[in-house]
Image: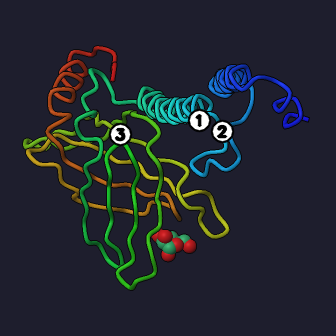
Amino acid sequence: MYQLAASLLPASLVNTLEDKFANIRSVLISGGVIAGSRDNSDSKEPPVVKEARDRLSNAQSTLESTKSQLREQKAELDVDFGVDSIFRALKGECISRDSGEYNYELCWMKQTKQKSKKGRGDTTMGKYARIGSTTVDEATSSGQIIPKTKVVLEYENGQSCWNGPSRSTKVILDCGEKNELTKITEDEKCVYSMFVTTPAVCELLTDANAGKAKGAKDEL
Ligand code: MAN
């Protein structure tokens, strides 16, 4: 049909028409209205469609990574770092102590773990939940018994105990020069206490205990 029409028209007109068709076709391809030539092995899509698809896919991955950063930052906002965020600097650090069958590990504001020395794997003893406080009776150098406030980091929802609750740990903090895990006890089955010294609570405990001496309300 095209051949027949072409043979009936003057060559110059055929050339002009062919040029016009080619122009219209390339406008349609670049506008994404029709697909480009099938034998163009680089892409079966017009370049603008491919570019738009690439831009969309880049924008989607940027959006996903921004969303995941936002999730992490929101989770961080939910973490209880205490008054003036005194525990924030300790986040990500861990201390440990060898005790009996296990190596015990405290990762501040994250989790507590019991690590088998016999290669039986690690047991999570709780995930960081909140800061609390407790009062312990202590003897002074003169033998006088006085109540002392301690800061407690509470870890909950650890690995479940066989026939029992999820493991949990109370990390009882006292003022000390170094971050040090000094003692671990299992008070009831799968309910643990870790005794830890840290410079992070010195000021807080001095203030709290000075307040207590004056009979002021404990405001930890
Ligand atoms: C393991 C340890 C112990 C715990 C028992 C409970 O042996 O986690 O601390 O008491 O499991 O079955």
Of residues 16 and 204, the one drawn nearer to the viewer in this rendering:
16
Residue 214 percent location from the top left of the image: 21, 15
The one nearer the camera, 16 or 198, is 16
Q: Nearer the viewer, mark 2 or mark 1?
A: 2
- Per the image, label 1 sits on a secondary structure element best described as helix
**Is the residue marked by circle 2 packed among few (<14), some (14-19), or many (20+) residues within 10 Å?**
some
Graded by Cα atoms within 10 Å as few (under 14), some (14 to 19) or many (20 or more), the crowding at tag 3 reads: many
> Residue flagged by tag 2: what amino acid is it?
Glu
Q: Which residue is mark 2?
A: 45
Q: Amino acid at mark 1?
A: Lys
**What residue would you read off at disc 1?**
50
Asked if labels 1 and 2 touch by Cβ distance under 8 angstroms, the answer is yes
Residue at horizontal 92 percent and vertical 35 percent from the top:
1
Q: CA distance from mark 2 to mark 1?
A: 6 Å
- Which numbered circle lies on residue 40? none
Which quarter of the rendering shows the C terminus? top left
Residue at mark 1: C-beta within 8 A of ligand 1 = no
Chain-order first, disc 3 or disc 2:
2
Please name the residue shown 74% across and 30% down the image.
34
Q: Position of residue 23 (x, y in %)?
A: 64, 22
Residue position for label 3? 152
Q: Is residue 121 above or below residue 17?
A: below
Q: In this view of the protein, can residue 62 be seen by the observer?
A: yes
Foreground label between 3 and 2: 2
Residue 94: quarter of image? bottom left
Outermost residue, bottom side: 118
Report the side of 77 relative to 157 (left or right). Answer: left
